[in-house]
Each structure stands twice: as structure tokens, then as C-alpha cells.
């Protein structure tokens, strides 16, 4: 699996209709109408997300590996 940065993941989910609700420190909190979940993406410059966190966020946001 290709690892991506938090910044790039934010761009991906914004393209899928997720909206930035607020920023709490270095964590960007996203919500989507009709989805009963929140996504918290850590944005630490261009540092890659950890593999387990990335998989979990992809599952919630319904992002396929091919979209990375």
C-alpha cells in the first residue's frame, strides 16, 4: 500500500464530499452529511500517515487503494 501524507489525504476526502468542520491543533476534523462518523486526520507537514491509521481512515471515508 502506498503511504500518503495527512495533507494529501485531506485533499482526497474533500474531493469525496467530506467537509472540514474544525481544526484542533494539528488534527483536521471532517464530517459528511448523511454519514454518522467523523474523521480526524493528523496533518504534520508532509509526514506520512501510519499504515494502520491510514487503512482505518480509508475504510471510514470509503477511499479505495487505487485512488491513492
Image: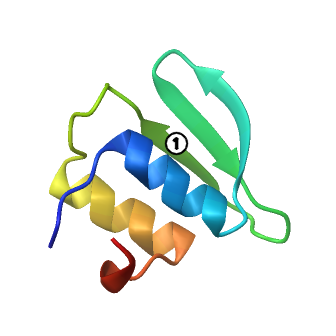
Residue 26 in which image quadrant? top left
Instruction: Name the image quarter holding the N terminus.
Output: bottom left
Q: Above or below — where is 66 with respect to 19?
A: below
- In percent of width and height, residue 5 lies at 29, 45
| Front residue (pair 47, 30) | 47
Residue 52 in which image quadrant? bottom left
Residue 28 in which image quadrant? top right
- On screen, residue 50 versus residue 27, left or right, reads left
- In percent of width and height, residue 66 lies at 32, 84
Q: Above or below — where is 65 with respect to 55?
A: below
- The residue positioned 52% from the left and 69% from the top of the image is 60
Q: Which residue is mark 1?
A: 40
Q: Residues within 10 Å of mark 1 (few under 14, many from 20)?
A: some
- In percent of width and height, residue 10 lies at 51, 48
- The residue positioned 41% from the left and 68% from the top of the image is 58
Count of numbered circles on the image:
1
Amino acid at each position: 500500500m502506498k503511504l500518503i501524507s495527512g495533507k494529501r489525504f485531506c485533499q482526497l476526502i474533500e474531493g469525496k464530499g467530506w467537509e472540514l468542520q474544525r481544526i484542533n491543533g494539528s488534527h483536521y476534523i471532517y464530517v459528511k452529511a448523511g454519514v454518522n462518523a467523523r474523521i480526524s486526520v493528523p496533518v504534520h507537514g508532509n509526514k506520512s500517515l501510519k499504515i494502520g491509521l491510514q487503512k482505518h481512515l480509508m475504510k471510514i471515508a470509503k477511499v479505495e487503494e487505487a485512488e491513492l
